[in-house]
Amino acid sequence: MPTLANALLDALKAHGANEIFGIPGDFVLPFFKVIEKSGTLPYFTLSHEPAVGFAADAASRYHGGLGVAVVTYGAGAFNLVNSIAGAYAERSPVVVIAGAPGARERTSGYLLHHQVRTVDSQLAVFKEVTCAQAVLNDPATAPAEIARVLRSALELSLPVYIELPRDMVDAQVEPVVRLPRREADPGALAECCDEILGRIAKAASPVMVVDIEIRRYGVEKDVAALARKLGVPVVTTFMGRGLLEGEDVVAGTYLGAAGDPALSALVENADLVLMFGVILCDTNFALSNNMTDPRRTVLATGREVQIGHHVYRDLPLADLVAGLDARAAQQPQRPRNSGNGISYPRGLAADSGAIAPSDIATAINDLFDRHGAMPMTADIGDCLFTAMEIDNTALAAPGYYAGMGFGVPAGIGVAMTGLRPLILVGDGAFQMTGWELGNCKRYGLDPIVVLFNNCSWEMLRVFQPESKFNDLDDWHFAQVANAIGGVGERVATRAELAVALDRAVERRGVFSLVEVMLPRGETSHTLARFVTGFKAARERMK
Ligand code: TPW
Ligand code: MG
């Protein structure tokens, strides 16, 4: 019989975990020892638990399996809450494994260090931000409990919580037996598919809107194939930017009033909107007026399919896409009123002019033309809006939850999956989690960081220009980079920017930080349009 620690590690691997991120503490030291000794999964420690959660989340977004975050009791686990909240909001299946006191400590009569109100306050908090929880305090039930929560993580694509009391690590248990995936009821699936195909047949101008769940459930290619077969154009949401990279069915990213007018018209004038894996949130749709109209909408999300005013429950997205594909007949491509008409800016003038945010997009498009596209992560800030002006390239970003501090640790997580990411981050967000780059050296990671340094919380300034608290100091981040094992370059002109990016691509083995100096008060074209649209929408609500 394996020990509980080994059974848990084997189960994680069998359920699609590729690596572990964590920070140890005494309540989880015995488990870390087994992580290291067993070699079941590679593991990476970072500096602060929020980054552990962001890295695990982003790694999972990129490789499509489970993310794993291992932390100690209380102080460690509570530090992780915000990243797991973000993973929940954005449907990322991160497995939290938190250390906890052993049975004897629980009844010792002392308050334990890291304890808050009760010994179980930690469990109570994580219940709010995970879809299933297991406390492994009984060797007889632990394997089944592990199987139950890991299946939920995969089926719902949401975080789960596993609490491992420190005296249980070496308990002898049965191996974990993976539970079968719960499929759609065949009758419900057939009825649902027929209904949707019937709607499509009657529609004059259908459009497909896709969002992150198509990646979470590994059906991007199938969705593209289905769209091709149905002859329906596809757009991604803001949150779903980067999906279907390189697929010719993608007409662009729907940004409502902030986006390309022809593309927005394609979506807003459609008589049928097929929403696959979509988060119906304000960042995706606040700049539209009819995206929640059920009469023209089919919404497949969260294992449910809503057509008009009724819902099919327990209908996994993968089954729906396969079911539609099996039943659909090949359609001629419908004429597009907006084809792949969006062209992203290229050909940056390499002159001594000051850099504007949108110039960074141009420079990156040029860079990708020269060296090939790189997978990206972005923080929240103008950097994410600037990303909308870069070619549709794989991207992980908190486009809905909008938690600052995601970009750099997410990029480190992506780098640990074996890719070389390009990280977009603002100075404010970098102040939160940029230090994590110091961990690249130990692991030989060489991400490229493009830091938008406007010495400002610019996204707040655009909403409230009169406030002085949005002014930040100049922290000279490029110099910091050199001190923590990377190479930093500060650039202030377009010529310097292009050269520094090229140098960064060629520099291997250490992280590169290109600190782009931007004037306060300037934003990307996309953010400027977004803010105008947002303010107008707010006025309409008054
Ligand atoms: C964890 C609120 C949203 S955007 C922003 C703040 C403070 C400013 C970002 O500054 P940065 O980028 O990174 O320099 P830029 O382009 O605007 O200059 N705390 C958290 N998350 C959010 N979203 C906020 C505060 C916020
Ligand atoms: Mg800033």
Image: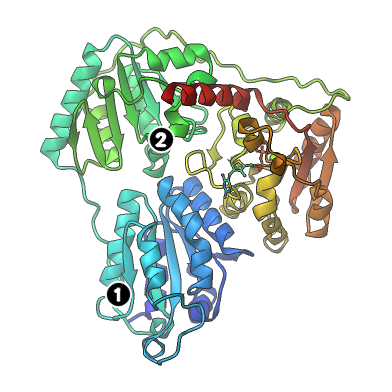
Instruction: Report which quarter residue 172 is drawn in.
Output: bottom left
Instruction: Report which quarter residue 108 is drawn in.
Output: bottom left
Residue 425 locus on image (x, y percent): 66, 42
Please say if 151 is above or below 262: below
Residue in the picture at 37% in, 78% down: 4
Left or right: 521 with respect to 405? Answer: right
In the image, farthest residue toward the left: 187
Left or right: 500 with respect to 275? Answer: right
Q: Amino acid at mark 2?
A: Cys
Q: CA distance from mark 2 to mark 1?
A: 37 Å
Residue 15 locus on image (x, y percent): 37, 59
Q: Secondary structure at mark 1?
A: helix
Query: The C terminus is located in which quarter?
Result: top left
* 80 or 214: nearer the viewer: 80
Around disc 2, counting alpha carbons within 10 Å, would you say few (fewer than 14), some (14 to 19), or many (20 or more)?
few
Please say if 185 is above or below 47: above
Q: Secondary structure at mark 2?
A: loop
**Mark 2 or mark 1: which comes first in sequence?**
1
Residue in the picture at 68% in, 55% down: 445
Q: How is the image coloured?
A: rainbow
Left or right: 237 with respect to 447? Answer: left
| Disc ID at residue 281 | 2
Is any part of residue 323 visible from this angle? no
Q: Amino acid at mark 1?
A: Ala
Residue marked by disc 1: 142
